């Protein structure tokens, strides 16, 4: 009996990698919103702040502070100071240089926004995957710098305020920076890493080769 060879080829696309990149984009969106809210904390969004000293009614934000009547001598109303870098010695360490460095919080939010749109694009076009991966890592680096700045400046300030009986309490901005950093570090980066490497090989070709009626060979080729 003469042998014969048949070639049956089927092609399937992967779906897991775009899903992972989509989840990464969603997670970085959440983290970015947290950083934007912290960046526009007091004196812009007065209900969001890093620390509130209740004894003298002062709220400290990213680009300034707002003080109530006990500090500025007013019976009613609120006085706010807006500036990149502000001095509140001896409680906040580093003076204007330290608080001015809080601009990293806004930079994290800005690059997080770019990373979000880049990841959405990478979910459909893997050619931009390397750029998205690098941009996400850079955003995470900025978030890490922001995390240490916020925790050192306002963690030290919290201790000094309470030492002077000013009844200091952490605000939402302090928590949002920590949560945003953790989301980027523990959720977004692993998802982007897995999604990018799984999606590098988008197509799987399965070829079935029959040399005769008694022998069948299945070959999987990834391209």
Image (spheres, grey):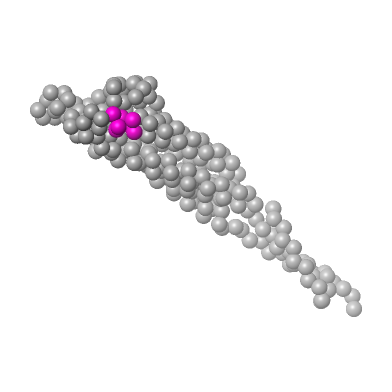
x and y percentages locating residue 183 in the rendered image: 43, 45
Instruction: Give the tally of numbered discs.
Output: 0
Q: Which residue lies furthest to the right in this view?
A: 1
Q: Quadrant of residue 133?
A: top right
Q: Is residue 126 left or right of residue 145?
A: right
Q: Can residue 125 be seen in this view?
A: no
Quick one: 39 or 205, which is closer to the camera?
39
- Please tell me which residue lies in front, 89 or 3: 89
Q: Which residue is drawn at 38% across and 31% down?
A: 152
Q: Position of residue 43 (x, y in %)?
A: 26, 30
Residue 194 left/right relative to 117: right
Per the image, is 157 magenta? yes
Answer yes or no: is residue 174 visible.
Answer: yes
Judge whether 49 appears above or below 127 on screen.
Answer: above
Taking depth in this image into account, of 156 and 67 the one nearest to the observer is 156
Question: Residues in magenta?
Answer: 154-160
Q: Which residue lies furthest to the bottom in this view?
A: 1
Quadrant into which the N terminus falls: bottom right
């Amino acid at each position: 009996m003469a042998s014969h060879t048949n070639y049956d080829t089927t092609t399937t696309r992967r779906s897991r990698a775009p899903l992972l990149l989509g989840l990464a984009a969603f997670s970085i969106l959440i983290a970015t919103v947290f950083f934007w809210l912290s960046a526009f904390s007091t004196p812009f969004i007065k209900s969001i702040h890093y620390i509130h000293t209740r004894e003298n009614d002062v709220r400290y934000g990213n680009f300034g502070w707002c003080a109530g009547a006990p500090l500025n001598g007013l019976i009613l109303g609120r006085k706010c100071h807006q500036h990149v870098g502000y001095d509140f010695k001896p409680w906040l360490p580093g003076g204007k240089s330290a608080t001015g460095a809080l601009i990293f919080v806004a930079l994290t939010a800005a690059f997080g926004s770019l990373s979000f749109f880049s990841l959405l694009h990478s979910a459909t076009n893997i050619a931009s995957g390397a750029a998205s991966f690098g941009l996400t890592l850079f955003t995470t680096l900025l978030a890490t710098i922001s995390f240490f700045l916020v925790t050192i400046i306002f963690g030290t300030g919290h201790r000094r305020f309470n030492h002077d009986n000013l009844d200091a309490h952490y605000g939402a901005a302090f928590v949002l920076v920590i949560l945003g950093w953790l989301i980027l570090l523990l959720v977004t980066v692993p998802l982007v890493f897995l999604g990018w490497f799984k999606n590098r090989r988008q197509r799987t070709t399965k070829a079935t080769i029959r040399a005769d009626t008694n022998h069948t060979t299945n070959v999987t080729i990834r391209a």
